[in-house]
Amino acid sequence: MKLGANSVLFGGYDMETAFKQIALAGYDGIEVSAIDGMSEHLVLDHWREITPQIKRLAQVYSLELLAMEQPSQDPAKMEQAFQSAVETGIPIINCGPGGKSGDEASLQQTIDSLGRLSVIAERYGVTLCVKAHVGASVYNTPTTLRLMEAITSPAFGIDMDPSHIYRAGENPVEAIAAVVSRVRHVHIRDCKGRQQGPGKPEDQANGRGNIDLVGYIRVLHEHGYTGPLDLEIIGAKTYSPVQCSMIAAEARGHMQACLQACGAR
């Protein structure tokens, strides 16, 4: 497995700061944030100008470009994301499911939308992933399985985030085992309690919460998963670079220990 961090942790700073600090924390790679409002890193309306900078920073800081997070399913926005991914060599685009929990029509709309986008991803030669998200149409294991059954494109995969599954009232270790056959990306972070939000940024750092992340990573390893484990910490936009770097380093140490504990490193 490849250890990475989403640049959104450093969303209050420029992209080079994110690359530099993530590299200093010892990560193998980076997930580039294209999340409007949370960062000004990969701004998709200007992707042609930004792409050369991303490639340069990846080379300078020896970070593999593991993924991109772009939450919208808007076809025009996603087309930009796919084009940018091809140009930069980013293999995975992560988006959100959208919609509303417990609403069958909303779930079907999400399935149809992601199905159409998967066909486009296939044409571009990249992988589109989506994760269960608190409050969205896909929010737990049963709705994730519905998505897996409906979308058969090889360019579509599941992105798993244990904190969302935990806040849906499920056991993330059991949940990852149920969907691991289609998992192509993992957003990883911890969580204290089962409230709506993930908590303060420092409490999202792996090892600070209630989730059995050792067991979670063990299941991935036992099923032969070799893709990205990308730390995704949100809410730190006003934090100092030192605070953000400490969170990144702490989580990286815990991730490494988990891999060692299950014999993956």
Image (cartoon, helix red, strand yellow):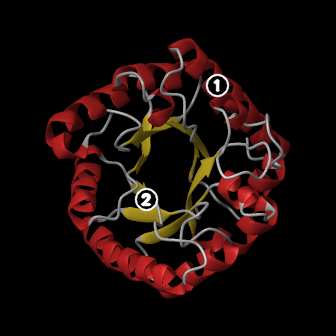
* 220 up-or-down from 121: above or below: above
Relative to 39, 26 lies left or right: right
Circles 2 and 1 in contact, beta carbons < 8 Å: no
**Closer to the camera, 134 or 141?**
134
Residue at x 58%, y 37% (from the top left corner)? 233
Residue matched to label 1 = 247
Tell me which corner region of the image, top left, top right, bottom left or bottom right, holds residue 177.
bottom right
Residue at x 67%, y 79% (from the top left corner)? 142
**Closer to the camera, 55 or 69?**
69
Relative to 50, 126 lies left or right: right
* 39 up-or-down from 112: above or below: above
Residue 16: mark in rendering: none
Q: Secondary structure at mark 1?
A: helix
Query: Where residue 111 sits in the image (x, y, percent)?
Result: 45, 80
Relative to 39, 5 lies left or right: right
How many angstroms separate mark 2 from mark 1 (CA)?
Answer: 24 Å
Residue 95: mark in rendering: 2
**Closer to the camera, 61 or 82?**
82
Q: Secondary structure at mark 2?
A: strand
Residue at x 72%, y 28% (from the top left corner)? 253
